[in-house]
Amino acid sequence: MLSHRSAAALWRLRPVDPPVIDVASPSRRKRLRTGVRVHRPSTLDPKDLTRHHGIGVTTVPRTLIDLAEVLGTRSLERALDEAEYLRLLDRQALQDAPRETHPVPAPRA
């Protein structure tokens, strides 16, 4: 599944960040591919996964939580603002989504 920056680009929350593609995989197998950054989240619930334009991707709330691991505060706030602007952000779903290691800032009112 696309995750992190690549999922954000698919959802149009951030610009495309080539040349690396971020994916989330619960598998612990070591199959490295050039240009693919594999994230191994401790939790990857099926409700955090969806399809967008036919592509497997993390949901918007899960994507925002994953972005908290890899972006600075200002970039994360911009992604949150864009999700709200595009009406992709369900505040309750964001609050209910599992957190890995980084809390997500609350959306601005």
Image (spheres, helix red, strand yellow):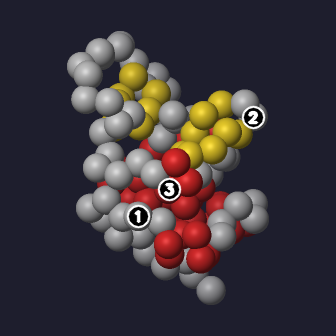
Looking at marks 3 and 2 on the same chain, the residue that comes earlier in the sequence is marked by: 2
Cα gap from disc 1 to disc 3, whole angstroms = 8 Å
Residue at left offset 75%, top offset 60%: 86
Q: Is residue 67 visible?
A: no
Circle 1 packing at 10 Å, graded few (<14), some (14-19), many (20+), is some
Circle 3 packing at 10 Å, graded few (<14), some (14-19), many (20+), is many
Cα gap from disc 1 to disc 2, whole angstroms = 24 Å
Q: Secondary structure at mark 2?
A: loop
Mark in front: 1 vs 2: 1
User: Does 97 appear above or below 53?
Assistant: below
Q: Which mark is residue 98?
A: 1
Residue where numbered disc 3 is placed? 62
Q: Hey, what amino acid is under mark 3?
A: Arg
Residue contact at pointers 1 and 3, CB within 8 angstroms: yes
User: Does 85 appear above or below 105?
Assistant: above
Cα gap from disc 3 to disc 2, whole angstroms = 17 Å
Q: Percent from the top left, x then y, of residue 19?
A: 46, 22
Q: Quadrant of the C terminus?
A: bottom right
User: Does 7 appear above or below 81?
Assistant: above
Q: Secondary structure at mark 3?
A: helix
Choose between 71 and 106: the one closer to the eye.
106
